[in-house]
Amino acid sequence: MNANQQHNKLKSPINIPLSVPEIKGNEWDYVKECLDTNWVSYVGHYVNKFEEVLADYVGVQYAVATASGTAALHTALLVAGIQPNDEVLVSTLTFIAPVNAIRYVGAWPVFIDSEPKYWQIDPNKVVDFLNQECRWNNGNLYNKLTGRRIKAILPVHILGHPVDINPIVEIARKFNLTVIEDAAESLGAKYHGKLVGDLGDISCISFNGNKVVTTGGGGAILTNNEEWAVRAKHLTTQSKQDSLEYVHDEIGYNYRMNNIAAAIGVAQMEQLDSFIDKKRQIASMYSKGLQDLADCSLMEEAKYAFSTFWLYTLLVHDSVVDSDSRQVIRELQKFGIQSRPLWRPAHRQKMYQDCVYYGTDCADSINALGVQLPSSVGLQIEEQEYVIQTICSLLNR
Ligand SMILES: *Cc1c(COP(=O)(O)O)cnc(C)c1O
């Protein structure tokens, strides 16, 4: 029986989404309290509570909750003092948000390729670029090609797996660069036992609907730098200086998280560890179920890593009979299974194709081959078995 016949045999319409939230805890109760008490906007005890819980969880001193992960990134770059025409090294294989945030402050991205094993930003390439393509002059580092000052490195921990960040932090210290972690996809992941979000100078999380923990939409900035934390809160609340008078001391933003979102977030954080357990079970079931596929690479976990396996990803190599990765995605859709490609590398996007890119074609090839598989916390075992069977019958024919 081929995969089509197998599908036709199943009566009910199947719809297995890529990643949907799991709302099974205290979310309803906490949101109801916001509505009942009228605390529905940017001030309220859940916003403060959510910040406390986040800072405690990651082990940093300060958390500032924002309206989105993108707003958190924009604000982090502002408080870290990234100036127009500075340059920021960033992963090219990433969701576009951190790259856009670099442009929001008028700075320029320098795109760094991925390493082939865990698909994260390649620390060797970061080190080589800074040592070989830049020049140290008067306490600042300059890109020899563009003449611009290098100010920061923005590694993105993609797909729930940490970047090999020690070499990056080490070279950042040497050249006096700021390390801004984008931990949007990787809350709860660990690097040598230490949680991501506490590995650099400042970090950002996202609580978008498909992230491991959601607030509907939202984000946060984490840091141990008190001055930066205070300024982040100030900037995200319109930089109002006086508690009574409408006096503002700089151009601020309406970037604060609201109390309803934070109420959802507090309830979600109570479940984070169990969500991560479930994601890791899903990953190990995929890894077992798909291990015999010829010419596919499975998602791995580095020795230094504790991965949350946010979205389990499979690389389908070209040699697989008439199945490039996009074909696999289209076929899975016919079977009611939602899957997705990885992000097109940022240096291939039309806004950024003239920016500096340092690497070979590793990110391109991961992009060409990658298929993200259903990874919702609520994914049932029978559903996952069906996904695995369908993939095996598609790729082994
Ligand atoms: C989701 C995401 C963001 C942005 O978060 P939003 O809350 O959607 O603005 C930033 N960076 C990465 C790597 C992401 O995956």
Image: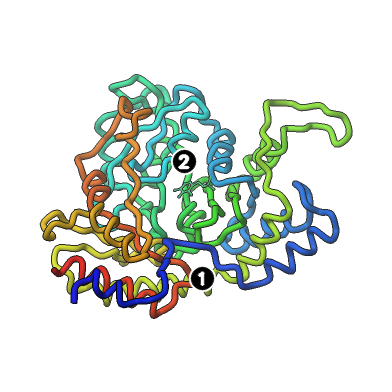
Which residue does the numbered mark 2 point to in the structure image? 97
Q: Tell which of 342 and 396 is nearer to you.
A: 396
Percent x, y of residue 77: 53, 36
Q: Which mark is residue 170?
A: none
| 157 in relation to 193, above or below | above
Percent x, y of residue 392: 22, 71
Q: Using the numbered discs, state the Cα–Cα distance from disc 2 to disc 1 in whole angstroms.
A: 24 Å
Q: How is the image coloured?
A: rainbow
Which residue does the numbered mark 1 point to in the structure image? 275
The number of discs equals 2
- Quarter of the figure that contains the N terminus: bottom left
Tell me what residue is drawn at x 81 percent, y 54 percent: 39
Which secondary structure, mark 2? helix
Sequence-first tag of 2 and 1: 2
Query: Does the beta carbon at disc 2 come under 8 Å from ligand 1?
Result: yes
Q: Are marks 2 and 1 in contact (CB under 8 Å)?
A: no
Which secondary structure, mark 1? helix
Residue type for callout 1: Phe
Q: Residues within 10 Å of mark 1 (few under 14, many from 20)?
A: many
- Quarter of the figure that contains the C terminus: bottom left
- Residue 42 left/right relative to 376: right
Percent x, y of residue 149: 41, 25
Specify the farthest residue to the bottom.
Answer: 382
- Residue 168 left/right relative to 181: left
| 229 in relation to 34, above or below | above
Q: Residues within 10 Å of mark 2 (few under 14, many from 20)?
A: some
Q: Tell which of 8 and 397 is nearer to you.
A: 8
Residue type for callout 2: Ala
Tell me what residue is drawn at x 58 percent, y 71 percent: 271
Q: Tell which of 104 and 295 is nearer to you.
A: 295
